[in-house]
Amino acid sequence: MLAPLRLLLLCLAVPAILLAMLLHFALDDRPLVDRQWSPDYQDAQRARQIFQENLASESAVRTLKLTEKDLNVATNYLLSRHFDSAAEVHMKPAGLRFVITLGLKSNLFGDYLNIRFDLQQRQNFLKASNLSIGSMNIADEFSGFILDTVIRLTPLQQYSILAGDHIDSVRLNNGILHIAYRLDPEQFARLSNLLALHSDHEALAVYQQRLAEVVARHDRSWRLSLAQLLQPLFRLAYQRSTLNDAIKANKHVIHTVNAYVNRDGIQRFLSGTVAADTDKLSVFLYRRIDMAKHFIASAALSASGNGHLVQKIGEEKELNDAWHGSGFSFIDLAADRAGRYFGEMATASPQAARKIQKKMAKIQDYRAFMPDVTDLPESLSGQEFEERFQDTDSPAYRRIIQQIDARIAACPIYR
């Protein structure tokens, strides 16, 4: 009887002993990086400037160009929004060297988690190597897996849009990191939200709380329409803002709603955008989830000052779907165009912003801002599209676009 009991106690003790050993080697008493750095308004502005400067191109593949200073500002800015942290990024001819310190609550094993790793140039991409956590050195074949796991299990997962399948190539050249990537309008709008200025968080929280209240009160036996989110938030914007800050208030409303509609299983795109315990419901336009997603993503893109990209990116996406996906959809394209028009009008001028607020505060349903386009052609294969429309410059194609624009212009909000 005694032997089995000893075996059971040993089995219970081994995991605790292993964990204690792991913490002993992983944690340190001193930071590797000076933790006095904290992002200020200029750093936030620079992060947004990097984004805007490098995403202005209308080409299918865009290039983000970062200097060593840009990398340090961006890395510290993003990490500091979620952790007590500091980081140093060193650019070398063959790759990047990251040194990161995370401050922990006081404990027996050490107050700091120090992480070091390299991203080395491998053809057109960077590969993780030389990973060390505290005094533990990790074999190169496990470095990438461990870093990916850390990202997935922390708030950093929301920035995964910055990597993965969206990246075409990464290369170092003369002290500049060039990242070539592709983003559709929804992903572009999500990235806009991620890089929103920290100073806007307090103002955003008001609209985020109202959205959470609307979702909590919604009768789940009925579909949640996009109008049911936009109407109360624009009413709040009309009550809270003045002519001087109406444009910013409208941006807050649009980005808050877009962050909810297009988050696709990720709890937050922007720190505090929607409370983590807000239950996610699908949002509809004309009983279609895809229309709501396209509309509000394009509105967010336009409200960020990038409306000129909506048509280009939207057409590229539909043409790609025609040959490699669900088919070309004029319905999705119409939602893109309506969203662009909505975002532009909501931020065109202080007077236009107040006018949209007042109108949106009184709408009854989504027909006020999105016409019925469900009769338009969709699910067209590449061959079917070419047989009927040749290309996006043909008279047949332009006639449908003109028809879409006429329907949008007839909506009450735009008259």
Image (tube, grey):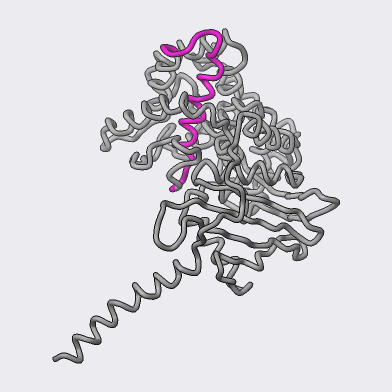
Overall secondary structure of the magenta section:
helix
Q: Residue furthest left?
A: 1
Residue shown at the point (39%, 31%) measured from the top left:
225
Image x and y of residue 349, in percent: 61, 12
Q: Nearer the viewer, residue 213 or 312?
A: 213
Task: Please state the total of marks drawn on the protein image.
Answer: 0
**With respect to residue 59, does 254 lie above or below?**
above
Image quadrant where one finds the N terminus? bottom left
Query: Which region shows up in magenta?
Result: 238-265
Question: Can residue 311 be seen at all in this image of the molecule?
Answer: no
Q: Nearer the viewer, residue 274 or 377?
A: 274
Image quadrant where one finds the C terminus? top right
Q: Quadrant of residue 229?
A: top left
Image x and y of residue 7, in percent: 25, 87
Residue 259 belongs to the span the image colors magenta: yes
Q: Is residue 236 left or right of residue 338?
A: left
Residue shown at the point (43%, 24%) measured from the top left:
230
Q: Quadrant of residue 360?
A: top left
Residue shown at the point (73%, 55%) measured from the top left:
169
